[in-house]
Amino acid sequence: MLMKKIRILVVISFTLLSFTLKAENGYDLWLRYYRITDTKILNNYRTLISGFIISGDSPIIQSAKQEIITGLEGLLGRKLPDQKSIQNGSIIIGISNSSPFISSVNLAGELKQAGKEGFIIITKVIAAKKVILVTGNSDAGVLYGVFHFLRLLQTHQSIDQLNIISAPLIQLRLLNHWDNLDRSVERGYAGNSIWNWHTLPGYIDQRYKDYARANASIGINGTVLTNVNANATVLTRPYLEKVAALATVFRAYGIKVFLTARFSAPVEIGGLKTADPLDENVKQWWREKVNEIYSLIPDFGGFLIKANSEGQPGPQNYGRTHADGANMFADAVAPHNGIIMWRAFVYSNESPDDRHKQAYDEFVPLDGKFRSNVMIQVKNGAIDFQPREPFHPLFGAMPKTPLMMEFQVTQEYLGYATHLVYLAPLFKECLESDTYELGKGSTVAKIVDGGINQHILSGMAGVANIGSDINWCGHPFGQANWYALGRLAWDHNLSSAQIADEWLRMTFSNDEAFIKPVKDMMLNSRETTVQYMTPLGLHHIMGYGHHYGPAPWVDKATRADWTCTYYHKADSNGIGFDRTRTGSNAIAQYKPEVQNQWKDVSDCDEKYLLWFHHVPWTYTMKNGRTLWNELCFQYYTGAGHVKQMQQTWRSLKNKTDPQRYEQVSMLLQIQSEEAVWWQNACLLYFQTFSKMPIPEQYEKPDKTLKYYMDLKFPYAPGH
Amino acid sequence: MLMKKIRILVVISFTLLSFTLKAENGYDLWLRYYRITDTKILNNYRTLISGFIISGDSPIIQSAKQEIITGLEGLLGRKLPDQKSIQNGSIIIGISNSSPFISSVNLAGELKQAGKEGFIIITKVIAAKKVILVTGNSDAGVLYGVFHFLRLLQTHQSIDQLNIISAPLIQLRLLNHWDNLDRSVERGYAGNSIWNWHTLPGYIDQRYKDYARANASIGINGTVLTNVNANATVLTRPYLEKVAALATVFRAYGIKVFLTARFSAPVEIGGLKTADPLDENVKQWWREKVNEIYSLIPDFGGFLIKANSEGQPGPQNYGRTHADGANMFADAVAPHNGIIMWRAFVYSNESPDDRHKQAYDEFVPLDGKFRSNVMIQVKNGAIDFQPREPFHPLFGAMPKTPLMMEFQVTQEYLGYATHLVYLAPLFKECLESDTYELGKGSTVAKIVDGGINQHILSGMAGVANIGSDINWCGHPFGQANWYALGRLAWDHNLSSAQIADEWLRMTFSNDEAFIKPVKDMMLNSRETTVQYMTPLGLHHIMGYGHHYGPAPWVDKATRADWTCTYYHKADSNGIGFDRTRTGSNAIAQYKPEVQNQWKDVSDCDEKYLLWFHHVPWTYTMKNGRTLWNELCFQYYTGAGHVKQMQQTWRSLKNKTDPQRYEQVSMLLQIQSEEAVWWQNACLLYFQTFSKMPIPEQYEKPDKTLKYYMDLKFPYAPGH
């Protein structure tokens, strides 16, 4: 009878487990908290953790408590007690001065290191009991500590003798949502906006909370809810009440809300005749609007503003500078400790100059003219979130102004949500680039974190890849890019491999036989994408407008720098954009040491060859191939790598759950077909200039150039 | 040690159970298959079901097998064996001639009754073993039987001596998706379209399969994927390949795919100069297009067409009739056994006549002129899916033509996805209406099911309320309307209460203490909505264009019958649309027996009073109140009922899961506020005509009419 009961229980356990596993739809992201299946590790954790004691009752501490309960219950497969007294294995959680247990330990040095938002996770013996303290100087620090502690368990780390101090290197760690009020998402490929404006403020979708949890788990502490191509309606009272409802949810996870401000709002919703930033009525209008916002959202973060760019209104409409515009907003939010993030992504409608140069030319003269609560938000490269760009020349060129980084997490130019492209290597490549601003070692990272120029403000933003798809990001591996953005904003010294490793363990499995090949696949994926899309410094040869697929033949657009021919300049002689002295001389915007890496075609880093040089088809590359043959090699190699990714994934069929296995299999097949599409369309097109054959060893394109040119995508998403 | 193990297992079971329960996000709809918690019932089922034997291996039978495995494993909490030999408690599944066990029993009479798509679930003793047979004449019948068998378990029915024969009364049981190729959904309030056209055909979202499962579980056997305001692009090759991929998924669940055909497609994508349905080139183009579709989708269902309505192109553009247009399509699909569904929802851009009359006037003269594979799809009422309308006068007026029913499941005029309105009573009210076509008892249902006029074709369609929201329908109770549509299309004799009962048991709980009050709430909810929105026969007084909220003051639109004043005609004398002989005489479109119910103001069914009559404010109602006071009574009573719904729901907090409890609580609060909004806005506005006071006992509106008139909803969804 007893044995029968056991059998039944085993059956039930198994059944429920499989039922739970069935639901691997990706909604839980990296916070799955499934019971640890390695019994040795599980038993070890069960021995070392007896329960928890949490002090404080602020909304953030309540979030931390809920998370530790959910996390431990899930991971350890048992409900652990909220302990009344200290015991061996107690997890003691709270800010340092809120808990007599934590206060009893001298952590002064550690707390100083942790700073405002950092955390300490440390094993101590208190009253003869071995316990783990999770603490910090702020509720947010404690929350981050709790998430990190759970991450240790999720990734099977030893927790026997913990001594972790971690503090963010960057102050403002942001997501930028390009979400419109009609729930469409500009450059969104994972469904529509998760902000359901219509049902706000009355209906609080569970997603809002889970979004906040996910962000807090990786240290993201701010979110810009609306598209940089802004709509003034969000600043009207009914919408501000909706924003306030979201802010309330996010506040409990240490996340501040920001909005985009449409420069012409005073005219559009304020009834003024002008939006001139030096006009007293305009200033007054913004001050009052800002006061209204803060009356609803006391910890409102501030505004992100795109002005005089791609048709957006801005101060130049009134003969004013970007500084005039930014400072007007800065003055309005300053009394509330708000900040202004002003985008450097500007290029004139009229200017015939290389787009690469325009942001630099406009902003460098303004260095020192911005208020202290203004940051300039600079994209990683000077063109627009390409698969590969050299770092933006503004980094290192505006010492008096805090420059924040704008990365794009959503894959506008990187295969939408159907290509597996792990972006940490792209982010890291930029962050580790040396600007030589103050000599060697003046990396972009150190400019962004404020270290080089001793700025108080620092920030990193990622344009979100989040939508209403059940798994948030469309591609299961798209989640890794959201994760990586947050982790790098916290600590840009983390390696791409470290981040991939922990994400994989939390999201898929701790099985080394799974992690190793998949991590390799992730780490190589960005280079692979560069190869099959835009090798050797090619850029912006995607489909017109929607940016889907290859379209290097696009030579007509409402402006020259929205064509593809503007960027690749292929002709019978060769291909590439001469940005040296003989061309646009954009290269002159970099420090001489940087220029030296790129300025001579003969020793230019070949990653950027066609970015800076127009090179003959017959040019001999360092490896001895002609440029044309190298181009063929790159495209075919990239497309071939995707096939290898498919093989790798197929070999792991039994090491992951069926639902995500199938999802990724289908997506890799799409990626593989699209890589071949890129390879064929680009080579057939460039061949019309090179007049050279695709080398024998490669399979010839089975479609004509005309076939590719005739493809139309009237409903490509995100556009 | 043994005891400890048991304890651990109990803990694990409990933990996993609670973890599973946590995920009550509504995705699983009424197919939750959670383990039965009533141990008596559970043990009874476990005793009576030992395993299953399934014969056949078609895709549909494989679906049935997967479902019985998942269902039994979930409900009974144990994996049941796929048995090799017959045993006590075997569930024997398959079409009658596929299984020696089933063939061994004489079921000739039952099978005849079951017909093409019906099923038999019957307890038999075979070879001295007591077994349950689930069978039918087709794979689809078997699949429906499996779902019904699982429903018996889900709703805790006795399965000791089963003898069920069930066959659908209506042949074509359809969902109409008003989904656009950009994934917006016209009149969709649950996110965007679940059809991700961009990633099709390569990526098969799990949702497609779960959508098919849900539909098959309620007998839906067809789906129109695209908006009736059609886009010709879906007929181009790349899109047809996407459609084919969906058709493959749906085929395994007995569901056929239909598309909407844009009448002008031959011009728009075919390069022809005309779309004249009598033009040989046009006919040829459609024949070839249809052949192409069938080459990709051999079981393609056919087309749904909206022509010459609300600006859509149609045969009248070429001086042809609706019959000319429909017959051209009918001829093209006939060789493939396809059908054409031609919508009767037409009203002229120019005609000054009562919109109520126009469909009848256009279509009745065409009766008998349509090909045998044409059905006319008629909305339940003559105006447009209002909270209450008398049945459409076409029902009973076109004996030679199969008329199919078009209901609206999405709540365009019924509070979007934030109002709890159970629509079965609305559907039933229409279906049970007597047209008197062939004398008393000629109900709409009997016309729709083909019984009255002996039509071979019969159909019922619902405009879907399905979107990308995790819970599919936005409101957890919106799922009940999808469910009810399917169940009524299968068997329109089911009562609203029966349907609500089984849906609640499957979706929420079998606890009578929960079911009874919630079922009451559901059953009353539609009448409540009529009361707070459009009592006494009022109609179409919603916001302009988006139809959100009250806006009876709308008196300007691009056409008169898109205003609200057109419909309520309030003036200082009274209110209501005179559709009797003294007015538009739309009433003459009904049979005399029907007219008698409505034609005299003195004994008109007061539900339809203002639909058919312009009535003085001081008119005395049957209950003795003046019309004005009755109007006030209705609005306040309706809004008051919503508050009672809130109370009811609050009292059930511990009888449902926290996530859905909170969701419904928030939504009921929105509904309550919006009901008051309707009450106040409408009464304040109508008061400007009646000049009469709102009776003392009611709380006065706290806002002015101007306040309500100034409300703007520029981003109301679905528009």
Image (spheres, coloured by chain):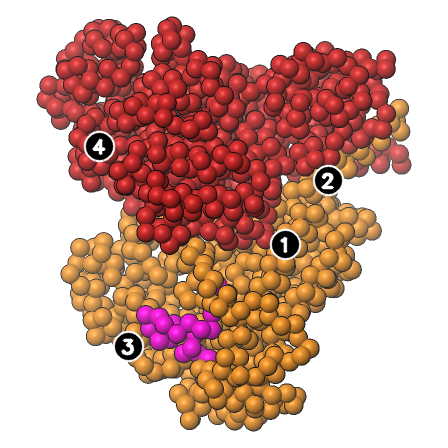
Chain colours: A orange, B red
**Disc 3 marks which residue?**
A350
User: Disc 4 is attached to a residue of which chain?
Assistant: B
Looking at the picture, how far across and down is residue B281, in whole percent?
38, 47
From the viewer's perspective, is B254 left or right of B599?
Answer: right
Q: Amino acid at mark 3?
A: Glu
Q: Is residue A652 above or below residue B526?
A: below
Q: Is residue A263 above or below residue B490?
A: below
3 or 2: tag closer to the N-terminus: 2
Disc number placed over residue A582 in the picture, else none = none
Looking at the picture, how far across and down is residue A355, in whole percent?
38, 79
Query: For residue B507, which quarter of the picture?
Result: top right
Q: Tell me the element at label 4.
A: helix
The verdict on a common chain for dots 4 and 2 is no
**Disc 1 marks which residue?**
A666
Disc number placed over residue A18 in the picture, else none = 2
Q: Amino acid at mark 4?
A: Asp
**3D distance between C-alphas at marks 1 and 2:** 23 Å
Q: Amino acid at mark 2?
A: Ser
